[in-house]
Image (cartoon, rainbow, N blue to C red):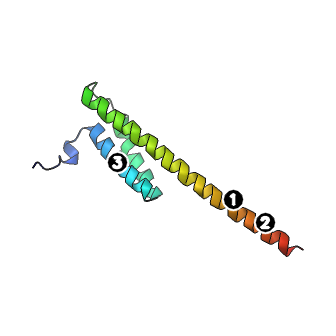
Amino acid sequence: MTEPANVSQQTPLAQALQLTRDMLIACHAQDWERLTALEAEREPLVLRQHPRDAATHAQLDELLACDRELQELVRRARDTVAGQWQKETDRSKAILAYAQK
């Protein structure tokens, strides 16, 4: 059994892909600070020049699929928070209207 490659020995794209997987874990845990920190660390790795080969293409496909999942998870979380905020706003308005009667 071989040991996993040291991160420093991985290609920048492989490092970016691992960071993307970590971003998904953070997103599922709703750890938004970690998610944004990982994204900032990942960005320069993704923006680099990458070889034009089958392995790179496969890694980019996986990275893009993970990004689509991240976008959907963040959208759902945002919509949930917006709904909760609206309910609290409506509740506060109802309490204020009741108190003024």
Residue at position x 22%, y 47% from top?
A: 7
- Pointer 1: residues within 10 angstroms few (<14), some, or many (20+)? few
Type of the residue with mark 3? Arg
Q: Quadrant of the C terminus?
A: bottom right
Task: Indicate which disc residue 86 carries.
Answer: 1
- State the CA–CA distance, disc 2 to disc 1: 10 Å
Residue 42 left/right relative to 80? left
Q: Nearer the viewer, residue 38 or 98?
A: 98
Most extreme residue toward the right is 101
Along the polypeptide, which appears first: circle 2 or circle 1? 1
Type of the residue with mark 2? Lys
Type of the residue with mark 1? Gln
Q: Which residue is mark 2?
A: 93
Residue 95 left/right relative to 58? right
Along the polypeptide, which appears first: circle 3 or circle 1? 3
Residue at position x 47%, y 56% from top?
A: 32
Q: Which residue is mark 3?
A: 21
Q: Secondary structure at mark 1?
A: helix
The image quarter in which residue 26 lies: bottom left
| x and y percentages locating residue 55 in the rendered image | 25, 31
Q: Secondary structure at mark 2?
A: helix
